[in-house]
Amino acid sequence: MLFKRVLLPLLIVFALIMGYFALALRWSYSSGERAGWVQKLSHKGWICKTWEGEQALVSQPGAVAEKFLFTVHDDAVAADINRLMGKRVALHYEEKVGLPSSCFGDTRHFVTSVTEVEDISLTPGVVVRTAPASAPASTPSP
């Protein structure tokens, strides 16, 4: 009797809540890429630690930079972002909606991968190619 009146409804409510979280974490409202320079990446949180970052997006030289705030759950992706800090990168993200607390992250944008960007587009049709890192020049011996 106690099971049918108390425990069964609690189990049903718990299962519905867990199903909602599973759906919200797997389903993406949107996904895309943002290119720019990562300015900040920190591991934050009292109980639920997440990587929170900030990327500067510059559309044209001299323009005010727009900030893209993002969250990273995967430590390997965070390590890749730290390795590419200071270089122009493209962050692939998925936007998640409906997550009820900041325990999942401070933002709705969850970065899933990062790639280094070789070209810098100044305006449509004008592209600056960045030179790959080369070996240091050797000095001729006398």
Image (cartoon, rainbow, N blue to C red):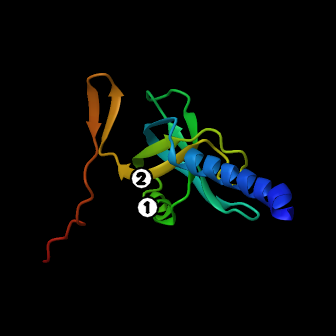
Task: Tell me: 121 left or right of 78.
Answer: left
Q: Mark 1 sits on what residue? A: 80
**Which quadrant of the figure has residue 14?**
bottom right
> Who is closer to the viewer here, 22 or 88?
22
Are there few (<14), some (14-19), or many (20+) residues within 10 Å of tag 2?
some
Q: Position of residue 34 (x, y in %)?
A: 44, 38
Are there few (<14), some (14-19), or many (20+) residues within 10 Å of tag 1?
some
Residue lying furthest top in this view?
A: 124
Task: Tell me: 7 left or right of 127.
Answer: right
Residue lying furthest bottom in this view?
A: 142
- Residue at 45 percent of width and 52 percent of height: 112
Task: Tell me: 97 left or right of 31.
Answer: right
Q: Amino acid at mark 1?
A: Asp
* Residue 23 visible in the current orientation: yes
Q: Position of residue 125 (x, y in %)?
A: 26, 23
> Who is closer to the viewer here, 140 or 94?
94
Residue lying furthest front in this view?
A: 1
Look at the picture and state if 98 lies above or below 102.
above
Q: Secondary structure at mark 2?
A: strand
Q: Secondary structure at mark 1?
A: helix
Q: Mark 2 sits on what residue? A: 113
**Which quadrant of the figure has residue 65?**
top right
> Who is closer to the viewer here, 136 or 115?
115
| Marks 1 & 2, CB-CB < 8 Å contact | yes
Q: CA distance from mark 1 to mark 2?
A: 8 Å
- Residue at 47 percent of width and 57 percent of height: 81
Q: Position of residue 119 (x, y in %)?
A: 29, 40
Q: Amino acid at mark 2?
A: Ser
- Residue at 72 percent of width and 60 percent of height: 45
